[in-house]
Amino acid sequence: MELQGFIDYGVFFITFTGIYAIFALGLNVQWGFTGLFNIGVAAFWAVGSYTTAIVTSAPNEVYLGGFGLPVALGWVAAMVTSGILAFLVGILTLRLREDYLAIASIGIAEIVRLVFKNEEWLTNGVRGIAGVPRPLEGWLGSGDGLFRVYLVLVVGLVVLLYFLLERARRSPWGRVLRAVREDEAAASACGKSIVSFRLQAFVAGSMIMGLGGAVYANFVGFVSPEAFDPMYATFLVWVMLIAGGSGNNGGAILGCFIIWVIWSGTELLINLYMPPELIARGSALRLLLVGVLLEVILLTRPAGLLPEPRTGDR
Amino acid sequence: MEILQLALFGLVLGGIISLGAIGVSLLFGILRFAHFAHGDLMTVGAYAALALVAVGWPLWAAFPVAVLAGILVALAVDALIYRRLRRTAPVILLISSVGVALILRSLIQIIWGADTQVYDQALQFPLRFWGLRLKLNQLYILLGSVGLVMLVHVFLQYTKLGKAMRAMADNPDLAKLSGINTERVILYTWCLGAGLAVAAGIFLGVDTRLQPTMGWHLLLPVFAATILGGIGKPYGAIVGGMVVGLASELSTVVLPPAYKTAVAFAIMVVMLIVKPSGLFGGGKR
C-alpha cells in the first residue's frame, strides 16, 4: 500500500515535470535561442488547454463545441491556435525594442484570462470545462494504468522535442537565431531578416507552449480560468529555464526537474507541518523562496547549471 | 451626464496611474529597463500606511512615513540586486525585477495575509454638485495627485538635480559626457519613483481596497501610460496616465466593465504600431 502510494506520487511528479519541460523547451526557443522576452507563458498555456478541452470533450449546450474528437487532434489544434495568437502578437511587437514584447506579453496574458473568464459561450466562464478526456481512456479505463501510459507519452514527447530542438539549435536556422540575439546589426548585414527570424522563433516557441497546455489539460481533465494563476505558471517556467541554463535544451529539462522538486517538495512540507490556518501564507512562502532563488541565480550563476554550449561545439 | 460622471472617475484613476507612470518612465529612460516591480512597490507603500493606520495613526500622518518606507525598500532592492546587474544586458534587469515583484508580493501576503483590507470602515456618502457624484476621498485623491504632479514639475524644471534627471532619461550617454554624476541621479530617481509609487498605492487603497495583487494589476495601465507618453518623458507619462484613466472608465459605456484593463492595453498596442516613440517623442528610437 505504502509502495503503491509512492509509485502513484512518482507518476504524477514525473508527468508534471515533463509538462513543465515542454514549456521550458518552448521558452528556450524564444529566450534561450533568440533572446525574446515573453512573460505571457500563461496565455499560451491557457489557449492550448482550452483548445484541446473544446476539441476533445463531449458535446454540450453551454460552451462552444465539445467536438469529441481524438486527443491527438486536440493537441494539433492547440498548437495551431497558440501559433496564430503568437503570430498576431509577434507581428505587432517584434519590430520594436525587446522591452515592448515583454510589456505586450503581460497584456496578452491578461486579456486571454479576461476572455476565458467572461465569454461563457466559448469557455463556460468561471465554472470551467470538466471532463476533458484522457487519451485511450476507452481502452484502459480510468485506473492507474491510464496515468502510467500518459507518463510514457509525456516523457516520449519531451525526448522527441529535445532531439528536434537540439537539431534545430545546431542547424543554420539555430545559428541565425543566435546571431539575431547576439548582434542584430551583424545578422542584418549578412542579409538575414531580423523580424522574420524573430517571428519564426516566437511562433515556434509558442506552439510548443500551446502543446504543453494541451498535454496539461488532457492530464488534469479540467480547465478553468483559475487553474492558471498567470504569474505562478509563467514565473515557474522562467525560473526553471534560467536555473537550468538558458540556451541549453538539456539545461531546460534539468531546471524543470530541480525547481519542480523544490516547488512540490515545499508544498508537501507545508501541508504536513504547517497549521492549517497558515497554509494560505505557506504558498506565499514558497513563492518567496523561488523568487529569492531566481535572484541568487541571476547574481551568482547567470548562465545556469548547464550553460549554453559554446558556438561551434557539436 | 453619465459621460461626465465617468470622466470624473477617469481623472481619479488617471491621477493614480500618472503617479506610477512618472517613476516607470524616468527609470526606463535612465536604467533602460521596464521596472516590473513598480506595481508591487505601490502595494508595499499602501500596506506600510495600513500598518500605521492599524495602530491608530491618521492616514495623513502615515502617508509621509510610508513614502519613506517605500523609498528605503527601493534603495535596498537597488543596492542588493539591480546595481549588481547593471553591467549586464537590460533584459536581465527586467527578469530580476519580475522576481523582485513576486518577492515583495509574497512578503506582503506572509505578513498581512491575502484577504482584502481597508483603511477606514466608515461608509462615505458622495458629495453632489452639478448633478455629479464624488466621494470626499476621491476629491482628496484628485487634489493629492495634482499637488504631487505640480511638485514634480517644479523639481524637474527648476532644480539642478531635476534637470540632470531629465537629461539622463532623455539620453544617458550624452548626460554622462556632460559631466552628470550618474550614480547620484540614479539614486535620486529611485527616491522620486518609489515615493510617487507609494503615493499612488495609498491613493489606490483609499479609492478601492488593499490587496496583495493591487499594484500588480495596475502595472499594465502604468506601462501603457509610459509608452503612450514616450519613454523617459515624465510629462508624457502624466498625459498618458490621464488618457489611459479616462479611456478605461469611458469604455464602460460600450464594453462590459470586466474589459477595462484590455482598453489600456489596446491603447498601448495602437500606440506601438502608429508611433512607438510616444505622443511626445521626436521620432527617434
Image (cartoon, coloured by chain):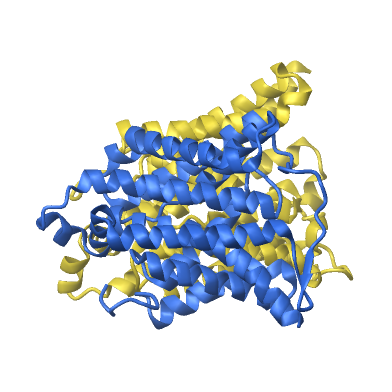
Q: Which chain is blue?
A: B
> Foreground: B148 or A207?
B148
Which part of the image, by quadrant, shows the N terminus of chain A? Answer: top right
> Foreground: B66 or A20?
B66
Q: How many marks?
A: 0
Furthest toward the right, the residue is A61
> Foreground: B258 or A238?
B258
Q: Which chain is yellow?
A: A
| Residue at horizontal 60 percent and vertical 76 percent from the top | B247
Looking at the image, residue A291 sits to the left or right of residue B179; the answer is right
| Residue at horizontal 34 percent and vertical 49 percent from the top | B189
Counting from the top left corner in percent of width and height, residue B231 is at: 36, 66
Counting from the top left corner in percent of width and height, residue A309 is at: 26, 43
Counting from the top left corner in percent of width and height, residue B86 is at: 26, 44
Counting from the top left corner in percent of width and height, residue B191 is at: 38, 44
Looking at the image, residue A263 sits to the left or right of residue B115; the answer is left
- Quarter of the view holding residue A301: top left
Furthest toward the front, the residue is B129
Q: Is residue B194 above or below residue A76?
A: above
| Residue at horizontal 46 percent and vertical 67 percent from the top | B238
Q: Is residue B257 above or below residue A18?
A: below
Does residue A168 appear in the picture of this structure?
no
Looking at the image, residue A54 sits to the left or right of residue A184; the answer is right
- Quarter of the view holding residue A170: bottom left
Does residue B106 appear in the picture of this structure?
yes
| Residue at horizontal 18 percent and vertical 50 percent from the top | A312
> Foreground: A9 or B116?
B116
